[in-house]
Amino acid sequence: MRMVKVPLGTRSYNILIDRNLLKSLGAECAKLNLGQRCAIISDSNVAPLFAKAAQRSLAKAGFDSVLITVPAGETAKSLKTVQLCYDQLAQHRLERKSFIIALGGGVVGDLAGFVAATYLRGIPFVQVPTTLLAHVDSSVGGKVGINLKAGKNLVGAFYQPRLVLCDLDTLKTLPEREYRAGLAEVIKYGIIYDASLFDQLERDLPKLLKRNPKTLSDVIGRCCEIKADVVGQDETESGLRAILNFGHTIGHGLEAISGYGKYLHGEAISIGQVAAAKLSAQLLGLPEFEVIRIRDLFQRAGLPVQVKLNPAQLNRLLDAMKLDKKVSAGEIKFVLARTIGKVEFGQKVPMNLIAPVLNF
Ligand code: NAD
Ligand code: GLY
């Protein structure tokens, strides 16, 4: 088993990565001194696949669990679903000593984490991610929250889990498109922090696409180490943590103007990262051949790398980007790369450079 520690003083926690880990969920929770009762929050796709195994393991370790199933998909990250979860927690008399288990992808993790952060002014929670994106990104670092009509993740908190348990076997049932979308976040870690991870991804992509467990364990472990390192230095994103948003300003804009339906998050940030690489070449001197390496790796992972927008769509994209949370004092700040493995945050980008880099 691979173990990565997220170093946050008294709120430090471990990320455990292995195959067949769900069966140890109860035993791992028992080590954390949590109460005897818990609620598993999962979605309508994931619960039928893994909730029984999770409940069996919890029962074996002496925990009493209830299952709360929410609809699958981004729309579950809403105040309405939060209310539904609160009502069920109260109905099952979960009290302050109880805890929550988020069993699912990033949607469930963000939602269940937000419920845990606010129910009874906060009860502990454990992340059991089941998508590749959630293994390497959303389950780690404590950003929890929900969407408003006005935009994504506009209500939330920094609230760290007590444990992240990544069972690689859960990825076997993940639909191919979702899996490839998760690879966009994996490639991001190579670009922002680790040139040798990027080299490894170029080499091992075929194995990764076949979901080879050994390669997955190595790569997920390294991504989690990078995220843990960044979050350990800047938990609440006053500076460094912004590098995790490489490609996200354009990516979030694309998701917003297409009504969060056309692109998966990973697909939108694939286009965003390739565009950010082009901007990096113009503004920070990222070598042109590295831009090509970046574009080619996303392409080989089966992800989109460009988008054609008409003038009206382009204006909507620029407007959407101005509404992003990363805007401060009306200025959009980008994360740009100097070389593969080294980025800088807080970079000003003139708006007129954006359109040309969206379409090679
Ligand atoms: P998701 O949670 O919607 O999961 C994708 C789809 O796969 C869903 O239909 C789900 O039911 C299904 N699924 C999940 N696991 C499965 C499995 N093992 N087998 C079969 N089907 C499975 O999407 P996601 O990509 O995991 O997460 C996206 C969300 O994460 C967004 O809301 C985004 O804002 C959030 N996010 C949060 C952070 C953070 O730091 N908190 C970081 C990145 C993204
Ligand atoms: N996914 C970006 C962050 O956790 O900060």
Image: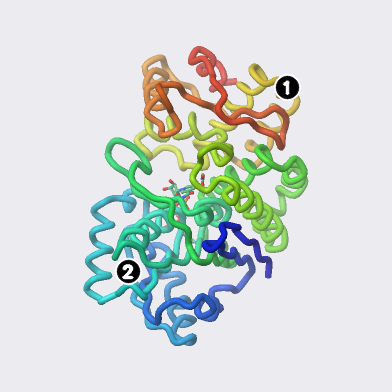
Establish if 139 lies above or below 331: below
Q: Is residue 74 visible?
A: no
The quadrant of the picture occupied by the C terminus is top right
* Of 184 and 160, the residue lying toward us: 160
Residue bearing the label numbered 1 = 288
Which residue occupies 42% across, 68% down?
101
Establish if 96 lies above or below 253: below
| Image marks 1 and 2: residues in contact by CB distance under 8 Å | no
The quadrant of the picture occupied by the N terminus is bottom right
Residue 68, disc: 2
- What amino acid is labelled 1 in the image? Glu
- What amino acid is labelled 2 in the image? Ile
Q: Position of residue 304 (x, y in %)?
A: 56, 34
Q: Position of residue 225 (x, y in %)?
A: 66, 54
Which residue occupies 45% across, 61% down?
104
* Mark toward the start of the polypeptide (1 vs 2): 2
Q: Secondary structure at mark 2?
A: strand
Which residue occupies 45% across, 21% down?
331
